[in-house]
Amino acid sequence: MRLLLAGALCAVALAAPAPASAGLLPDLSTLPGLDRHTPASGCPFGFVVLPGDVCPTSLLLPPDEAERDAAERPRPPGGPVRTKPAPYSAHSMIYACCTPSAQMEKAFAAARAAGAGYIRLDVNLRGIFTVRKGEPRRSDWAGVDQVAVLARAYRLPVLAVLTHVPDHIAKCNADHTNSCPADDLESYGRYAGLIAKRLEGVATYFEIGNEPDGGWAFRGSPAEYARMLDAAFRHIRASVPSARIVLGGLMYQNTAWVSQMLATPGVSAIRKFSVANVHLRGRAKHMPIFVKRWRRYFADRGFRGQLWVTEHGYPANRLFQYDPAFRGGEAAQAAYLSRSLPALRKAGASQVFVRLRESWPTEFLGEYASEGVISLSQRAPYSVRRKPAFAKVVALSHRWRKAQSLIALRRKHLRAARRASKAGKRAKSRRHRRLARRYAKRLKRLGEY
């Protein structure tokens, strides 16, 4: 998102001459949700700037040490997560690096209760492969392993968003390491491959960066992103052949950036992802139009994969409800999602990820802050409040699963009718066709899903 309160605090902190002015701002490192890393004295004001950002800037483990370290630390036991995903999933706003495990579990439980097909969460490369103060430090797999444990416990597959290029392979200076492109592409790819191997069976889909067409999230050029996408594709598929690559969610409806990215010489970027990916917000009536435009755009360039919408939501705060047809607080938010979610799916979005939780004040304020369908407390015991929109998502997921059952039964009886007709058993064929029509009527009465 563009309105980042914490990002503004970071800019102020970096401009300050010395930590002597630290008393001017509260110590945000004490807030749950930002406490995975213990800040060092060199960090401005002594707090982690954003969820997933490691402070201070540090050297990182070379790739060979990281690979050896990953091999020495076994993955959590457990088999693959096998489900038939619903078309509605959870954009969780949780972070493998720095969300406390109890808080993370509340998010997984809420996503599961909502009937989500997948849970989308950030996996921070800088938070895994670090050293501190020049002293080697073993790769920190604790957060990633916790994700794997919870995914298996709740039978909820993960869409892992690979964020934060490690410092020693980044092109920009330390002030902008959150959004730097990779300079050493092969090392970046190896890191991505290690994460994919660690999450094998839990995460099949890996999203390369978030909103790379937005300046706040990625400071590189379209060509630099294309080369990172290529490196991640090669190493992830080498590590886990069944893994699939998801294009970083496109923030804008303007196709200029993605066209430049796809035109990068020597990369064939259109072949390096299995799922095209956009973020959609706006008036409900415009949602199907946007999906159809994006599907046509990618199809015209030879892409035959799915289109996902990995961020979608609508504010519950009356001040920011921009759709005139849906104003009135949380009830209007629920009504909006009841309209927009089926419309997105029917227009051709194979997955729609609904914003799960509201933002915390330490993250950002404004129109995006109240999009979540739950409120998840930032402090222990991490209480959860389900908003009316949550119940609407549950109802849509339930109707979708019911519809799949009715569709399967209808097809079963149609096949049986054809077999009976070929065998000359006309009475039996009529009976099966009558049952097929009955299930078709039930499907029609089910309504939008």
Image (cartoon, helix red, strand yellow):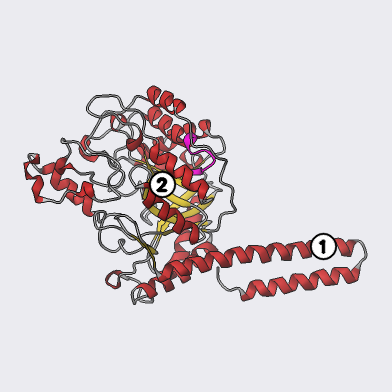
In this picture, is 333 found above or below 172? Answer: below
Residue range corresponding to the magenta coloring: 197-205
Q: Report helix, strand or loop for mark 1.
A: helix
Kindly identify the residue that appears in the image at 90 percent across and 69 percent down.
426
Q: Report helix, strand or loop for mark 2.
A: loop
Of pointers 1 and 2, the one earlier in the residue sequence: 2
User: Is 55 left or right of 72, judged from the image as shown?
Assistant: left
In this picture, is 391 found above or below 159? Answer: below
Which amino acid type is shown beneath numbered disc 2? Gly
The residue that disc 2 covers is 248
Residue 157 in view (yes/no): no
Q: Quadrant of the N terminus?
A: bottom left
Foreground mark, 1 or 2, reads 1
User: Is 27 left or right of 418, judged from the image as shown?
Assistant: left
Kindly identify the residue that appears in the image at 36 percent across and 37 percent down.
125
- Answer with the quarter of the image where residue 225 lies: top left
Tell me the tag on residue 261: none
The residue that disc 1 covers is 416
Residue 41 in view (yes/no): yes
* Residue 211 position within the rendered picture, expressed as x and y whole percent measured from the top left: 36, 49
In this picture, is 342 found above or below 243? Answer: below
Which amino acid type is shown beneath numbered disc 1? Ala
- Answer with the quarter of the image where residue 195 lies: top left
Q: Is residue 198 inside the magenta stretch?
A: yes
Spatial CA span between label 1 and label 2:
45 Å
* Residue 271 position within the rendered picture, expressed as x and y whole percent measured from the top left: 51, 40
Kindly identify the residue that appears in the image at 42 percent across and 38 percent down.
229
The residue nearer to you, when weighing 439 against 135, is 135
Kindly identify the residue that appears in the image at 64 percent across and 62 percent down.
404
